[in-house]
């Protein structure tokens, strides 16, 4: 055998092995984040019985969303500046501490003895928790982007983004199991807290941040080395404003805010809506059908967008156009809808909402971070993902403030129509990008000239641009 061929095969096998390991560890990372986050929402009724009233819970949610949004911007930069596995590990261990604080504050009965102090402590726990949780999206996506090339990235990231829904489903099932067995409801917070801490330590020792950490040189690095006459590719980061000016980053960030709001409206309010049709325990379990539907959504959008040469905006817009009439059905018929049909449509809604949300914060963000305008910088994906995720969280937090009053004034019909309007606005904001993809103004088959200088591109292939 040719020694070069044997060496290449061995390196490919080594790359495939480490890709599987990285996929698994980062998948569990994000699942753990959602496991702990969702378990808290599932025990709100028990917290109310313990004296933590709805006003406190509402402010805890607001504090969490605020710091989660701000933290996404910060975590993205931290992930580009420092070892990602350390940032992720600190985030997971931090979630353990915050869930522990909630349990300690509840056990102490401080909310009953000193309401102002209890109010502050419970809100403070979720305030800090939001910062730790914000490390999940940007930093894990940054690690995945370093390990998986642009070609075929949509399907891989579509599968990978099932992590959050696995976490949500596990949270719903574990909480229901603990309550059904008659165990203390505090265990629903203890279990995810302990598991988060353990898995955070796993990251510190076993997660390689990029192929070069285990002695692997990727094809992109080899090509960059040829272009730069053997000089190594740039490893520095770019500034926040520079990342924001990458073409389409700002547009996706604003549009994603409206899509993420629709998702978070379901995340926080779906069990409440279902309680009008089912008992509270059943409503929690049934709400997981929405999460089940969101899993294949990302896979479908990723796979189809790969088939259409990376034209992800067109696929996202198609899903949104299908979602609007489905939301209208809920607005008109949700009060009289047969339970079986309601469950089927919830799963379908999960597919249509989950697909675009999953892909924008993963494959789309990774594509944007590979844009030629950044001139070969390899540490920008965390910042780009943080911008998109953080902007989306801010918009979602503002939207969630409207749901309660809107539901009180116009019932769930008004809420469904409001969600339709948000989907329409978000899709319209993607109009310029959709137009470019349809008319192929942004796509060319020209390839970079072999003798181009570092950071200079003569043409961009279809798969190089989001």
Image: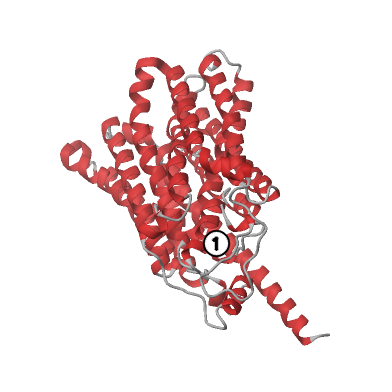
In the shown orientation, is residue 150 left or right of residue 12? Answer: left
Q: Residue at x 55, y 36 (%)?
A: 353
Report the residue that reaches farthest toward the bottom: 3
Q: Is residue 276 above or below residue 11?
A: above
| Quadrant of the image occupied by residue 453 | bottom right
Binning the other alpha carbons within 10 Å of mark 1 as few (below 14), some (14 to 19) or many (20 upward) gives many
Q: Residue at x 77, y 81 (%)?
A: 5
Residue 41 picture location, percent across and down: 41, 38
Q: Secondary structure at mark 1?
A: helix
| Viewer-closest of 24 and 70 | 70
| Viewer-closest of 443 and 383 | 443
Q: Is residue 255 above or below residue 333?
A: below
Q: Residue at x 50, y 38 (%)?
A: 181
Q: Quadrant of the N terminus?
A: bottom right
In the shown orientation, is residue 43 left or right of residue 353? Answer: left
Report the residue that reaches farthest toward the right: 1
| Viewer-closest of 288 and 313 | 313
Residue 241 picture location, percent across and down: 36, 57
Asked if one can make out residue 191 in the rendered structure from this viewpoint, the answer is no
Q: Residue at x 51, y 53 (%)?
A: 365
Residue 139 picture location, percent across and down: 45, 60
- For label 1, the residue is 145
């Amino acid at each position: 055998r040719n020694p070069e061929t044997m060496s290449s095969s061995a390196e490919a096998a080594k790359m495939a092995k480490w890709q599987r390991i990285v996929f698994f560890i980062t998948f569990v990372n994000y699942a753990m984040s959602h496991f702990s986050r969702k378990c808290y929402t599932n025990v709100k009724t028990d917290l109310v019985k313990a004296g933590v009233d709805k006003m406190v819970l509402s402010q805890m949610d607001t504090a969490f969303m605020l710091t989660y949004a701000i933290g996404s911007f910060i975590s993205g930069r931290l992930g580009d500046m420092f070892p990602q596995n350390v940032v992720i590990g600190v985030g997971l261990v931090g979630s353990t501490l915050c869930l522990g604080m909630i349990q300690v504050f509840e056990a102490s009965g401080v909310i009953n003895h000193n309401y102002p102090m209890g109010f502050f402590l419970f809100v403070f726990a979720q305030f800090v928790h939001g910062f730790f949780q914000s490390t999940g999206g940007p930093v894990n996506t940054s690690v995945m982007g370093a390990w998986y090339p642009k070609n075929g990235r949509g399907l891989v990231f579509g599968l990978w983004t099932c992590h959050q829904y696995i976490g949500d489903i596990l949270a719903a099932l574990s909480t229901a199991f603990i309550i059904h067995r008659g165990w203390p409801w505090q265990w629903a917070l203890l279990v995810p807290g302990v598991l988060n801490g353990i898995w955070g330590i796993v990251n510190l020792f076993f997660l390689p941040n990029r192929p070069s950490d285990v002695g692997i040189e990727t094809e992109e690095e080899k090509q960059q080395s040829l272009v730069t006459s053997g000089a190594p590719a740039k490893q520095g980061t770019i500034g926040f404003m520079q990342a924001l000016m990458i073409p389409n980053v700002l547009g996706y960030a604003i549009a994603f805010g409206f899509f993420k709001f629709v998702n978070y409206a379901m995340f926080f309010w779906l069990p409440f809506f279902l309680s009008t049709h089912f008992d509270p325990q059943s409503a929690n379990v049934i709400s997981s059908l929405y999460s089940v539907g969101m899993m294949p959504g990302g896979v479908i959008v990723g796979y189809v967008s790969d088939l259409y040469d990376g034209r992800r905006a067109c696929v996202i817009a198609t899903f949104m156009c299908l979602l609007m009439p489905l939301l209208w059905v809920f607005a008109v018929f949700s009060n009289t809808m047969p339970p079986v049909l309601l469950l089927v449509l919830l799963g379908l809604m999960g597919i249509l909402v989950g697909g675009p949300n999953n892909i924008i914060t993963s494959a789309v963000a990774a594509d944007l971070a590979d844009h030629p305008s950044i001139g070969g910088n390899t540490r920008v994906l965390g910042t780009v993902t943080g911008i998109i995720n953080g902007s989306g969280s801010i918009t979602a937090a503002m939207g969630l403030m409207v749901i309660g009053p809107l539901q009180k004034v116009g019932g769930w019909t008004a809420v469904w129509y409001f969600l339709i309007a948000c989907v329409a606005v978000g899709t319209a904001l993607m109009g310029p990008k959709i137009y470019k993809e349809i008319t192929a103004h942004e796509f060319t088959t020209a390839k970079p000239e072999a003798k181009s200088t570092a950071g200079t591109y003569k043409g961009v292939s279809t798969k190089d641009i989001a």
